[in-house]
Image (cartoon, rainbow, N blue to C red):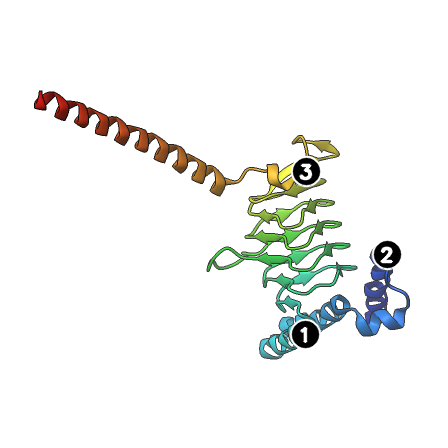
Amino acid sequence: MVFRTIKEDMKVVFEQDPAARTYFEVMLTYSGVHAIWAHRLAHWLYNKNMKFFARFVSQFARFITGIEIHPGAKIGRRMFIDHGMGVVIGETCEIGDNVTIFQGVTLGGTGKEQGKRHPTIENNAMVATGAKVLGAITIGENSKIGGGSVVLKDVPANATVVGVPGQVVVQDGKKLKKDLDHHKMPDPVAETCNDLQEQIKELKAEVEFLKKGRMNNHDDSNI
């Protein structure tokens, strides 16, 4: 069982990464594979209530690979972490089978709430570079999270999400937006700044109007 799992973990690298050449190379040099193997040991220790040793293993793996996976996280079969530096996976994360995660991804919480507080990533999902998936939300099967996106609510199956905050732009092969350009997604910060600029313009116009009124009144009093 253990050897079958190890072989699966390496085999998926060849399916996902065209740069992979030999099993020997993957076994010795792929940090994503090392992080997953270390997590399997840490998770076993965690379930045996040896939480200190579990955290020690996970933190040692973090030091070696740059990938932090909490021992309590549940990870399915054939997960592929590409490059991996900066990946953070929280304690109550649940990750299905055949999931792909790229570098800089955070699967985190949104506060100090207890219980389930991290995302659930269902089978065949992909989370691209730098994406942040936060809170006890679910990313549906076969869904894709675009690079740099910040996802704060559930994503249905077979969907593509991009932007900050993340918005579903494709579902079941049909576009829900005109395009996938990140810069055209809603930006609440920019919208607020634009509103403030408009208000400042209106206030300046009112001040100028009041100034002119005072000047006219002053000229009339001199006459």
User: Label 3, on which residue?
Assistant: 180
User: Label 2, on which residue?
Assistant: 15
Is residue 48 depicted above or below 74 in this figure? Answer: below
**Regarding mark 1 in the picture, which secondary structure is present there?**
helix
Q: CA distance from mark 1 to mark 3?
A: 36 Å
**Regarding mark 2 in the picture, which secondary structure is present there?**
helix
- Out of 218 and 21, give the one closest to the viewer: 218
- Out of 88 and 37, give the one closest to the viewer: 88
Q: Nearer the viewer, mark 1 or mark 3?
A: 3
* Residue neighbourhood size for the residue with mark 3, other residues' Cα within 10 Å, grouped as few (<14), some (14–19), many (≥20): some
Find residue 193 and report its horizontal and vertical position in percent. 44, 40
Quadrant assignment, res 65 = bottom right
Quadrant in which the C terminus appears: top left
**Picture residue at 63% right of the left edge, 41% below the top:** 182
Q: CA distance from mark 2 to mark 1?
A: 24 Å
**Regarding mark 3 in the picture, which secondary structure is present there?**
loop
